[in-house]
Amino acid sequence: MPQLSKQPFYRAMEMVPGLLVWATFIASAVLSFVRPVWVVLFIIILSILWLLRVLYFVIYLLVTWRQYQSNALIDWSARRKQYPDQSDNIVHAVVLPAYTEPIAVLQKTLQSFTNGDYPSRNIIVVLAGEARDASFPAIAQQLVAQFHAAFRDIFYTIHPAGLPGEIAAKGANAHWAGQKLLEYCRTHQIATDDVIVSYFDSDTCVSGNYFSMLTAQFIEHPNRYRTAFQPIAVYTNNIWESPLFTRVSAFSTTFWLMTELARPERLYTFSSHAMSLTALVDVGFWQSDIVTDDSRIFLQCFLHYDGDFTVTPLYATVSMNTAMSSTWWKSMINLYLQQRRWAYGVEHFPYLMWHFRSNHRIARATQWKFIWKLIEGTYTWATTPILLFIFGNLPLVIMRHGQQSANIIEINAPIVLQWLMGIAMIGIVLSAIIGTRLLPKRPSGMRPKKSIEMILQWAALPVMLIAFGAIPATEAQTRLMIGRYLGFRVTKKLGSPAYDVYVEHRHA
């Protein structure tokens, strides 16, 4: 539980998103019986807005896809070498929080750092383990022995359990590891201004041009210490073996991020990202008492620098695992919990409202823009699929049973809705096309029809939007509203335990 939740205003703001969602559901249900025509008109308007959102999605997805392809043609190793005085001084540090991971997962991750066009001897790796994980020290020691010659240095930290003011979460582990990294740099006389920190999940494998591209863009950025760098997160490490619903969800997340990359002014850090050690030191590293530390770090910097902090798109890919587990049922549970954790980013709303109230150095227009983006995004995430695909039919059914079959709205509403949804299929078709382009090579021995399945899977998107979108988002906002905060729980994926944080913490 965040310490600020004990403050009345902060606690009230925690309740706002959930109240909006449930007010919408209750009003839609009640009005479907007493004013069904109103609800039908509302759903038609919502469908039009949904269509506009799909067109927005298509345009910006294509923009990012074009940028990604263009950047893939650039020799980033040669480009960074154009600045020898700066490039030679830059040190990359990678913070890898881990908890009960099999050693093979971390080996694959570390190996990817050495396979690219950047000299891995200029990379420091921090393996961040937990005291609760008795197996970690032996695994870490084996990895240090295996990779010590490949990197400038590789060492491990062990985050103590139960530190005051923390919750058991990845952010708390990263907070501890970041402080140890700072101590290391000071001991070895490495200037914080020269260190770029990549904060990765334990199963994050980088593309071959990641470190060179990051180096060059860091050097060329006019305000390098006031920005974070966000690569394209793809969940393709085990995509061919994953069940249908985990694949669709994985690609949907990637495409959402790609549309955000096309509009950097809207962009938060998400999952794996990078920024200067200087900025991390200034804000005190990742927050240790929240669930969504990967996006909160951007807001910490944005507030600390009075709005003078941005996120820079990095058109390189970092690949991770889907939420696949050993069975379909376990995979569904993993996916649901993963989506619920991401949706718990709604906890940023009270955080922003609290800090904007006292920060007058950030323009009011900018503050309201951030608040609107956050509340609108979390609200539509939870409500729109349910309103369109469930409440869209309820008032029509009630009108028929009320013997109002001659009503012109009842006659034409299904036609209008089908027409709008048909146009919205453009987004699904484009997703299928780009999704096949992002796929790694099909494993040998896997039947060719699997490739066809990768295209046809997108027909399941409407169901996915409800089951693994709206419902976990509604639960996340409801939990924040009633004070049943998400805490720590490890959700194991097949081949890679996901470091997700879940168990409830009731508000005192």
Image: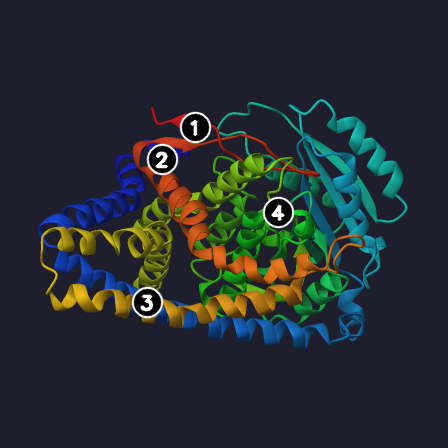
Q: Closer to the N terminus: mark 3 or mark 4?
A: 4
- Residue 479 is labelled as 2
Image coordinates of residue 87 in percent, x first then y, are 77, 66
Mark toward the viewer: 1 or 3: 3
Give the Cα distance between marks 3 and 2.
34 Å
Task: Report the residue at 38% width, 48% height from top.
Answer: 470
Image coordinates of residue 505 in percent, x first then y, are 42, 27
Image coordinates of residue 455 in percent, x first then y, are 59, 63
Image height of 370 relative to 70, above or below:
above
Mark toward the viewer: 3 or 4: 3
With 241 as the anchor, is 16 left or right in this view? left
Q: Closer to the N terminus: mark 1 or mark 4?
A: 4
Q: Secondary structure at mark 2?
A: helix
User: Which residue type carries mark 4?
Assistant: Thr
Query: Circles 1 and 2: CB distance less than 8 Å?
Result: yes
- Residue at the spot of label 1: 504
